[in-house]
Image: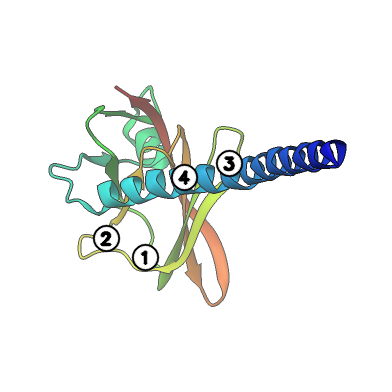
Amino acid sequence: MAQQLQAERNRRTGLEQENRRFQERTLAPARTYESQVARLESQLAELREPQPNIPVYDLLSREFFIRSGSASVANRVAVPHTARSFNLVLNAEGQPKYPSHTIEIMDREGRLRWRAARLRPDRHGNFTLTLNRAFMSAGEQRLYGERDGRSERIADYIVLLRYL
């Protein structure tokens, strides 16, 4: 009888240990998930806050630099460390007019990162992009004009981007 009681206690202890291990295995991912949710909620709250004095950079096209005889064809942009985002104004002065436009952002390797079609210029004939510093790296922005279902490249905007 004593042996039976001891065997039952050992079995119970083993089951309790197995139960604790099971709970640890199932609770660890839940804790990780809760931590990730809290971090993402914090980031979202920060992104919803107003951001004063967003830097604005007026970009000139490579074609504009060439026409003006400039030695460089790149726009140099230095974004301060305080800026979460910044605005790029694609100056379309002297560019042909089209009913709609497409803007593409390419990365350093020439891969398409982002594309928006059927865009119309602002009242000054320019296009403004608000970019997050986490999204944008140095690269090239292309502006296309679209007419009668056909797309023609209008201008390239080369950006040498630096984060301070």
Q: Please, what is the three-letter code of the amino acid marked with disc 3?
A: Ala
Left/right of residue 19 with respect to residue 106 in the rendered view: right
Residues packed near mark 2 inside 10 Å, few (<14), some (14 to 19) or many (20 plus): some
Q: Pick whichever of labels 1 and 3 is earlier in the sequence.
A: 3
Q: Hey, what amino acid is under mark 1?
A: Lys
Is residue 90 in sight in this rendering? no
Task: Name the quadrant containing residue 62.
Answer: top left
User: Residue beneath label 4, please?
Assistant: 36
Instruction: Work out which residue is located at the far front of the displayed protein and give it.
Output: 1
Query: In this view, which residue lies farthest toward the left?
Result: 52
Q: Amino acid at mark 2?
A: Gly
C-alpha distance separating marks 3 and 4 = 12 Å
What label sits on residue 107 in the rendered view?
A: none
Q: Are marks 2 and 1 in contact (CB under 8 Å)?
A: yes
Quarter of the image where the N terminus is located: top right
- Say what amino acid the circle numbered 4 marks: Gln
- Say which of 22 and 111 sits in front: 22
Helix, strand or loop at disc 4?
helix
Mark 2 vs mark 4: in front: 4
Q: Residue at x 39, y 43 (%)?
A: 39
Q: Position of residue 78 (x, y in %)?
A: 29, 27
What is the crowding at mark 3: few (fewer than 14 residues within 10 Å), some, or many (at least 20)? few
CA distance for labels 2 and 4:
43 Å
Residue on which the image places disc 3: 28
Q: Which residue is mark 1?
A: 97
The residue indicated by pointer 2 is 125
Residue at 28% in and 56% down: 126
